[in-house]
Image (cartoon, rainbow, N blue to C red):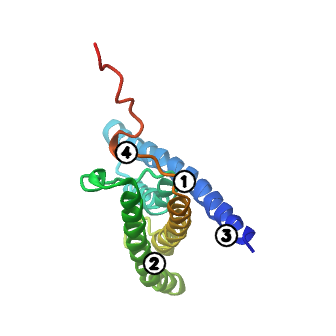
Amino acid sequence: MKKVPRILEKIINGLSYVTGGIAALALVAAAIIITEGVIVRKALGVSTIWQIEASVFLLMYACFVGAAFAQMHDHHLNVDLVIIHLTPRNREITLIVVSILSCIICAVIAWYAWPMWYEAFMRDDHSESLWGPPLWIPYFFLPFGMSLLFFQYIVYIMNKIKFVREGAFSEGFTPSELKDVDSKKGKGK
C-alpha cells in the first residue's frame, strides 16, 4: 500500500515534467511569433491578425500549466523575510502550512474553472477577432494547470511532512532568491 503514493508521485512529477517542457517551448514560440509579427508589420507594412492572440494563448499555457513544473523544482517566488528567523523545524512547518493554503487556492480556482472551460467547449465559443480560434483551448489551460499544481502541492506537502517527521533538516538556511548563487564567492579578498 506504501507503493501507491510513490507511483502517484511519479505520475504527477512525470506529467509536470512533460508539461513544463512544453511550457518552455511555448515561451520560445511566443517570442518567435511576436518577433515575426513585428518584422512583418515594419518591413512589409502588412498587418497580421493572429500573432498577438496566439502569443497570449502560449503565454497563458506557460504561466498556468508550467506552474506545476516550477513547484516540482521549488522555483516559485518565496518571501523569506519571516521564515529566515525561525528554527529549522518551525520553518519547515510554516512551509507546510503555506503550501496547504496554496493547495486550497489551486483547488478552488480549478473547481470554478473546469465548468467555465466545459461551457466554452459545449457552446463552441470562438474569439471575436478575425482569426477567431476556439476559446475552449486557452480556457483549458487554467483548470488543467491549477489541477496539476494542486496535485504537485500534494506531493510537496507529503514530502515535507515526511522530512519533518524524520527530522532531517539542516540548521542552516539558504534564502530562496539566492539558492542558485554562490554567496561565498568574492568573500575574504
For the residue labelled by badge 4, is the local secondary structure a helix, a strand or a loop? loop
**Residue 20 disc label:** 1
For the residue labelled by badge 1, is the local secondary structure a helix, a strand or a loop? helix
**Residue 107 disc label:** 2
Question: Which label lies toward us, 4 or 2?
Answer: 4
Give the alpha-carbon distance from disc 4 to disc 3, as whole Å: 29 Å
First in residue order: circle 4 vs circle 2: 2
- Identity of the residue drawn at 53% across and 52% down: 168
Q: Mark 4 points at which residue?
A: 173
Question: Which label lies toward us, 4 or 3?
Answer: 4
* Residue 103 image point, x, y percent: 44, 72
Question: Which label lies toward us, 4 or 1?
Answer: 4
| Residue type pointed to by label 2 | Ala
Q: Residues within 10 Å of mark 2 (few under 14, many from 20)?
A: some
Q: Do the residues labelled 4 and 1 touch (CB within 8 Å)?
A: no
- Identity of the residue drawn at 42% across and 56% down: 59
* Residue 123 image point, x, y percent: 50, 87
First in residue order: circle 4 vs circle 1: 1
Q: Are marks 4 and 2 in contact (CB under 8 Å)?
A: no
First in residue order: circle 4 vs circle 3: 3
Q: How crowded is mark 3: few (under 14 residues within 10 Å), some or many (20 or more)?
A: few
Give the alpha-carbon distance from disc 3 to disc 2, as whole Å: 19 Å
Q: Residues within 10 Å of mark 1 (few under 14, many from 20)?
A: many
Q: Residues within 10 Å of mark 4 (few under 14, many from 20)?
A: some
Give the alpha-carbon distance from disc 1 to disc 3, as whole Å: 22 Å
Q: Do the residues labelled 2 and 1 touch (CB within 8 Å)?
A: no
Viewer-side residue, 120 vs 88:
88
Position of residue 160 in the picture relative to residue 186 (left or right): right
